[in-house]
Amino acid sequence: MGYQTEFFNSLSHISASQWCSLNTSGTPFLSHTFLSLLENTGCVGDETGWQPHHMAVFDGDKLIAVVPGYIKYDSYGEYVFDHGWANAYHQHGLAYYPKWVNAVPFTPVTGPRFLLHPDYDVTQLTLYVAEQIKCQLPDIVSSAHILFPPGATARQLEALDFPRRYSVQFQWYNYDYQTFDDFLQALTSRKRKSIKKARNQLAQQGVTVERKTAENISREDIAFFIRCYQATYLKRSGHTGYLNEAFFYQLAETLADKLLLVVASTSDGPCASALLLFDEHALYGRYWGALEDINELHFECCYYQGIEFSIENNLRYFNPGTQGEHKLIRGFEPVFCNSCHHLFEPVFHHAVKDFLHRETPAIAGYFKQATDVLPYNDKAKQQLNVFTNSSVDNDITTTTTEN
């Protein structure tokens, strides 16, 4: 094809305008601004375990593809868990790290991973990028991993010998609700009463919650959020979080129109805060922290306020983050997510391929179990994505049927 491939250790080598011409998704996480912030504030690079190693493809002087990538020295902040693979390498005297991941750091949100020029054939350009990954990376890393690509990309990569791994997340969908009470009416009577009771208990304890966006988010608000975020991370994980103060301050300065800040207060003042991002289609959560342990406050700030915001702004869905079966009983439906993997050691590549083939039915079974406990009433279930099959990847259905 006559294309040229280059790798860069910083997004500064690619202009924002060039990047924007390829990034048509609209999601804030794939913006030049968001990814550059991670680099410029030191959240990736140096000793973070995430060394930028981005791919760019040129047709002459014309940039036709960019692939955000990172050389990884551990598996933290990815949300696709491969520690067992790393242990198997170690047991056989091989090094699993460093590896290369095509991902948005610390962000388990499905979205385009290969940003391709709209004037070029998507299939052919995807094939070229996949082949370049196989050819250019084996000398410096053990393996290549594409994390949270859309289903269509995952299917293409699977056909190119990047075996697909399935996982399950939980998302809330907006079925043209006009109010939060409309959403509650779609639930079973028992669950509807449970949510109302939990929200009323917070009010009775004097807890108030405020949502702020854009210019209404002050520097003081961000400072309080950071305090909550770091305190909660320190309590749970022994460190103050993957993202630092500089990142959050600059995020509020550069992407304010994409931010939703939720602040909870008692009579003593602010006590908790959640920070979410949104675009014209969806709300994404969430960074969270609290200075007080108040029952149900986490669910109010991180889930119910997000649902209300999504309804008020006609957003199609709300992705609250990875894991957490407790989301199910609050109306979040299971959805399949993808990752694709190519290990450069043939024996291990085939072993992982076999493992994923055997793992898939278990993931499908978990999905089915999650579906069975959704709290929607019979009438509402007739329109749910999970039941109409619009959110279910037909490929996994085929795979599990064959097994």
Image (spheres, helix red, strand yellow):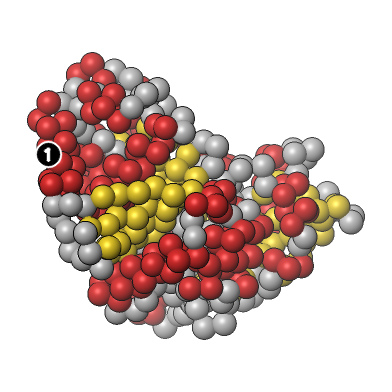
Q: Quadrant of residue 190?
A: top left
Q: Is residue 339 above or below residue 336?
A: below
Give the residue displayed 61% in from the left and 71% down from the top. 39
In what quadrant of the picture does the C terminus appear?
Answer: top left
What is the count of numbered marks?
1
Nearest to the observer: residue 57 or residue 40 = 40
Is residue 137 found left or right of 229 in the rendered image?
right
Residue 387 in percent (x, y) is at 31, 25
Q: Quadrant of residue 240?
A: bottom left
In what element is the residue under mark 1?
Answer: helix
Amino acid carrying mark 1 in the image: Lys
Residue 50 visible in rendering: no
Is residue 217 found left or right of 391 in the rendered image?
right
Residue 140 visible in rendering: yes
Q: Is residue 367 above or below residue 95?
A: above
Residue 192 in percent (x, y) is at 16, 31
Residue 345 in percent (x, y) is at 51, 69
Q: Is residue 171 above or below residue 248?
A: above
Nearest to the observer: residue 364 or residue 370 = 370
Give the residue displayed 19% in from the left and 22% down from the top. 377
Alpha-carbon neighbours of circle 1 within 10 Å: few (<14), some, or many (≥20)?
few
**Direction right: furthest residue:** 60
Q: Quadrant of residue 40?
A: bottom right
**Direction left: furthest residue:** 190
Is residue 153 found left or right of 311 in the rendered image?
right
Q: Which residue is mark 1?
A: 197
Residue 220 in percent (x, y) is at 45, 66
Nearest to the observer: residue 36 or residue 231 = 231
Is residue 162 found left or right of 374 in the rendered image?
right
Give the residue displayed 54% in from the left and 60% down from the top. 252
